[in-house]
Image (spheres, rainbow, N blue to C red):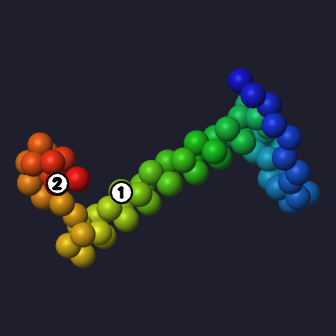
Amino acid sequence: MTTISVPITGEQEKFINNLVKSGKAANKAHVVRYALQRLAEEEAVNAVLQAEREIDEGKGLRGELKKLLKKI
């Protein structure tokens, strides 16, 4: 596991500390790892939504995979 140092605002530090104090997070590192996990999930959902929009706009490909691969 890699360790990185990131400057944060006082407000962000207070928020993290409050999550730990309230028991919602085991420690500060847990808060940051959880936030990164949520961001990754949000990015994945946004990618799916973007793909759906592109399909609705007619930008998607339809057909047999082998035939589509030959076109590409």
Classify 10 Å Cα crowding around label 1: few (below 14), some (14-19), many (20 and above). Answer: few
Residue 13 visible here:
yes
Q: Nearer the viewer, residue 64 or 19?
A: 64
Tell me the residue that label 1 is attached to: 48
Residue 18 visible here:
no
Q: Residue furthest bottom?
A: 57
Q: Nearer the viewer, residue 47 or 32?
A: 47
Q: Residue furthest right?
A: 10
* Coordinates of residue 13 in the picture (x, y in percent): 86, 51
Tell me the residue that label 2 is attached to: 71
Using residue 8 as the reference point, say whether residue 41 is left or right of it.
left
Number of marks in the rendered image: 2
Callout 2 secondary element: helix
Quarter of the rendering occupied by the N terminus: top right
Using residue 51 as the reference point, say whether residue 67 is left or right of it.
left
Residue at image x 49%, y 48%?
A: 41
* Coordinates of residue 17 in the picture (x, y in percent): 84, 45
Callout 1 secondary element: helix
Q: Earlier in the sequence, mark 1 or mark 2?
A: 1
Q: Nearer the viewer, mark 1 or mark 2?
A: 2
Q: Nearer the viewer, residue 70 or 52?
A: 70
53 up-or-down from 13: above or below: below
Query: How far apart in space, not on screen, are marks 1 and 2 (Cα)?
Result: 23 Å
13 up-or-down from 60: above or below: above
Residue at image x 24%, y 75%?
A: 57
